[in-house]
Image (cartoon, rainbow, N blue to C red):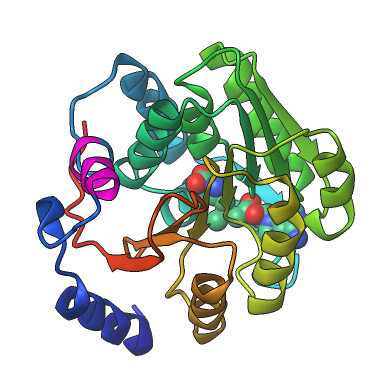
Amino acid sequence: MKIRYLFQYIRYLFRSKHRKGFGIHSPFVFRLVTDVIEEQTPYYKYSLIEKVRRLYLKTDKEVTVENFGTGESGRKKISTIVKHSAKSKAYAQVLFRLVNFYKSENILELGTSFGLTTMYLAAPNSKAKVVSIEGSKEIAEYAKLSFKRAGFENIHVETGNIDTCLSQVLAGFERLDFVFFDANHRKDATLDYFSRCLPKSHAKSVFVIDDIYWSKEMTQAWEEIKKRPEVRVTIDLFFYGIVLFDTDLQKEDYTLFFLPGGE
Ligand SMILES: C[S@@+](CC[C@H](N)C(=O)[O-])C[C@H]1O[C@@H](n2cnc3c(N)ncnc32)[C@H](O)[C@@H]1O
């Protein structure tokens, strides 16, 4: 683990004080934290998705990874990619619960990889429209296969570079209820994608920015997002940040001490 990342995690532990809703004055945010984010009841679709994860972690197969400016390209083991880049089940299950709570129907994910988190986003509602963008062609094909085999018919994978295909993908959405930003972990790209998605947001939209402490640039992007006038509430879970736009809520930034649990 990078020293900077470890340092950021220790800082987060000291800053985070809202475990179990402690100190949260907003009744809505209190409920969101205690009944949604920290809720741990297993849901039957979790085990189906985790079965797919186990298959990927067991395989010896390799894929070609394409470089979009933040990683290395070349042949890599699928199991290594899934181990290091897919969201863990505990954090993916928080996304599932948020989608479920907000009844999100128009969902966008930037960075599909093998589609494990995409399935968590799609699982609460088989009628929701879920679009996920992945640039590495071979990986995108694997994701499509997983969705087919696991019976997810409401996911569309757009294969291409987000920089060039995001506008066209956004044109296909009247509004965005939920966006998970998990692709290019650079400051400029994160802020650019965020700004481009904003016009389609509404009071009940939820945007989640992955890995807000992964690098200095990502932390800077997160700090800028928190200051945006459209943003009302942010909830920092260290491994990602949740952004709410509801104008009924008082502007506030929370740092939640989140203990991963899950099935
Ligand atoms: C961290 S992984 C996504 C993990 C996935 N959301 C999950 O939790 O299982 C990031 C993915 O974004 C893709 N990616 C990065 N930059 C991209 C870009 N500019 N356009 C398209 N895909 C990109 C990478 O190929 C990689 O598969």
Position in image of residue 213 (x %, y %)? 42, 75
Q: Which residues are magenta?
A: 27-35
Residue 140 seen in the figure: yes
**Residue 109, quarter of picture:** top right
Q: Is residue 30 part of the magenta span, yes or no?
A: yes
Residue nearest the viewer, comparing 7 with 39: 39
| Number of dots carrying numbers | 0
**Residue 230, quarter of picture:** bottom right
Tell me the quadrant of the picture where the C terminus can be found.
top left
Tell me the quadrant of the picture where the N terminus can be found.
bottom left
Q: Is residue 88 part of the magenta span, yes or no?
A: no
- Vertical relation: 3 (above or below) 168: below
Q: Left or right: where does residue 258 sit relative to residue 8?
A: left
- Vertical relation: 94 (above or below) 214: above
- Vertical relation: 189 (above or below) 233: below
Residue nearest the viewer, comparing 233 with 128: 233
Question: Image point 28% across, 49% down: which residue?
Answer: 29
Position in image of residue 170 (x %, y %)? 81, 43
